[in-house]
Amino acid sequence: MTLAQSKFSCSSYLPKVVMILGILKEDSFDNRVSTIPETVAALIKLGFKEVLLESEAGEGAGYRDNDYIAQGARVTSEDEIVSKSDIVVKINPLTGTQATKLAAGKMLLGQYNPLTNREVVAPLLSGKITAFSLDMLPRTTRAQAMDVLSSMATVAGYKAVLLAASEFTGFFPMFMTAAGTIKPAKVLILGAGVAGLQAIATAKRLGAVVEAFDVRTAAKEEVLSLGAKFVEVEGAVESAAAGGYAIEQSEEFKQRQADAVHKHASMADIVICTAQIPGKRAPILLRKSTVEAMKPGSVVVDL
């Protein structure tokens, strides 16, 4: 998601004062950028006095500094952005140094997973910084244009299958040759949310035989519609208040779940783990004993 996608709501809430927005470069492990060039012009139209960009912030995503300058941004240093901007935008949490430089009363926009990353929230609270973590937006129709998780989950599910295919020593599709038939790869997807469904679709397009597991009964129809087999474990607890996500399960169910995963994973060539529970660490569905029971040459991709 980019800031342009949320302009329908921003214009109503921006204070009637001139403000400066600063775009920081992401950490070295992340090629993304929080704001693309075409968004800069839209932000200026919304009333921002100036849009500052840290030099080479968009390089990893394929955007040059001149692309931003052409849309009205000014390229400058990290120090100037942190000191002058009223709103600072960065997908990943600020580094310790960046956080200490941000003055009280400033605003921060990004993705921080605050329910589990308490160490990220603490310095913002002590520094009296107002932070908006976009990954906390509810999964509702009204907030759909600002859904930053679904887009990234789609990319992750797609890339996970391509990564598995490149590491796997066999073939995904079935080959029928004069020398004999090569069976298609068996792929097990754990979790059928946005990432899981994209992984299923991608693996099917590559010709694999796909199975998928999820504790939510609503996921069964989606899995079957993509041509995969649904691995069902009875007794799962669900909650309408979870917003479409899975919730914590009983120990009894977890044991039945582990047995089912063990059975199917031990016969699979590829296992892709995508399951998540909001506000908690992702559940461990693939245990050590299961990995040891898998065939030599099998591939596991854990998201």
Image: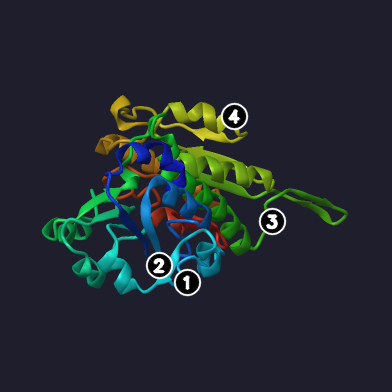
Q: Is residue 208 left or right of residue 244?
A: right
Q: Earlier in the sequence, mark 1 or mark 2?
A: 2
Q: Which residue is mark 2?
A: 25
For discs 4 and 2, the disc positioned in front in the rendered view: 2
For discs 3 and 2, the disc positioned in front in the rendered view: 2
Q: Residue at x 19, y 60 (%)?
A: 119
Say which amino acid is labelled 2. Answer: Lys
Say which amino acid is labelled 3. Answer: Phe
Q: Position of residue 295 (x, y in %)?
A: 54, 57
Q: Residue at x 45, y 67 (%)?
A: 57
Measured in 3D between alpha carbons, the distance from the residue under mark 4 to the one under mark 3, in whole angstroms, is: 24 Å
Say which amino acid is labelled 1. Answer: Glu
Q: Which residue is mark 3?
A: 171
* Callout 1 touching callout 2 (CB < 8 Å): yes
For discs 4 and 3, the disc positioned in front in the rendered view: 4
Q: Position of residue 69 (x, y in %)?
A: 51, 65
Q: Earlier in the sequence, mark 4 or mark 2?
A: 2
* Callout 3 touching callout 1 (CB < 8 Å): no
Q: Nearer the viewer, residue 184 or 58?
A: 58
Q: Nearer the viewer, residue 171 or 247?
A: 247
Q: Earlier in the sequence, mark 3 or mark 2?
A: 2
Q: Which residue is mark 1?
A: 56
Per the image, label 1 sits on a secondary structure element best described as loop
Q: Nearer the viewer, residue 278 or 266?
A: 278
